[in-house]
Image: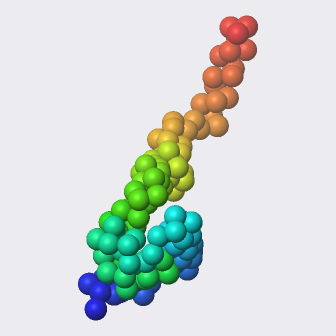
């Protein structure tokens, strides 16, 4: 039984689909290299049933196993980019909201007074 069964049971459909596609892509990479499941599992340091679960996109398979599979196909360097801060849209939107909230908001009266002063000075 999984330690975080609740987390796995609430996996968003988009995340489950992404894992399924990742597993399928890893299976295609193995097949294109003409490697058996037994040999590939051995290279990953897992059992054949775990390899099969990974290739099916099972969320219960450890992230380290997925990372090792990416390393085997020369794609592990792409992993950090997945959560790179510059691509974190939610955090970027929060930064903008916080900046807007901190911005000094002028009252209509102060804006009018400033415009009158500008007009009086010929500014």
**Which residue corresponds to the image point at 45% horizontal and 53% vertical from the top-left?**
74
Q: How many marks?
A: 0
Percent coordinates x, y for residue 20 in the rendering: 54, 77
Q: Is residue 36 left or right of residue 18?
A: left
Residue lying furthest top in this view? Answer: 122
Q: Nearer the viewer, residue 71 or 43?
A: 43
x 69%, y 22%: residue:
115
Q: How is the image coloured?
A: rainbow
Q: Is residue 121 above or below residue 75?
A: above
123 up-or-down from 26: above or below: above
Residue 66 screen position, x and y as percent: 40, 67
Residue 93 in view (yes/no): yes
- In what quadrant of the picture does the C terminus appear? top right
Residue 26 place in picture, x, y as percent: 50, 68
22 sits left or right of 59 in the view: right
Note whether residue 25 is visible: no
Residue ranking furthest to the bottom: 1
Q: Please give the name of the residue rendered at 51% of the width and 38% of the height, measured from the top-left corner.
A: 103
What residue sits 36% from the left and 62% below the top? 68
Residue 35: x, y in percent?
47, 70
Viewer-side residue, 32 vs 15? 32
Q: Quadrant of the N terminus?
A: bottom left
Quadrant hosting residue 54:
bottom left
Q: Is residue 56 above or below residue 30?
A: below
């Amino acid at each position: 039984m999984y330690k975080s069964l609740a987390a796995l049971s609430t996996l968003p459909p988009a995340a489950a689909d992404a894992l399924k596609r990742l597993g399928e892509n890893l299976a295609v990479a193995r097949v294109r290299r003409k490697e058996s499941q037994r040999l590939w599992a051995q290279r990953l340091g897992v059992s054949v049933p775990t390899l099969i679960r990974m290739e099916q996109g099972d969320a219960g398979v450890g992230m380290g196993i997925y990372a090792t599979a990416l390393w085997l196909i020369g794609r592990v360097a792409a992993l950090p980019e997945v959560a790179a801060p510059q691509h974190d849209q939610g955090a970027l939107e929060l930064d903008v909201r916080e900046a807007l909230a901190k911005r000094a908001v002028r009252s209509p009266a102060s804006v009018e007074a400033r415009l009158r002063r500008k007009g009086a000075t010929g500014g």
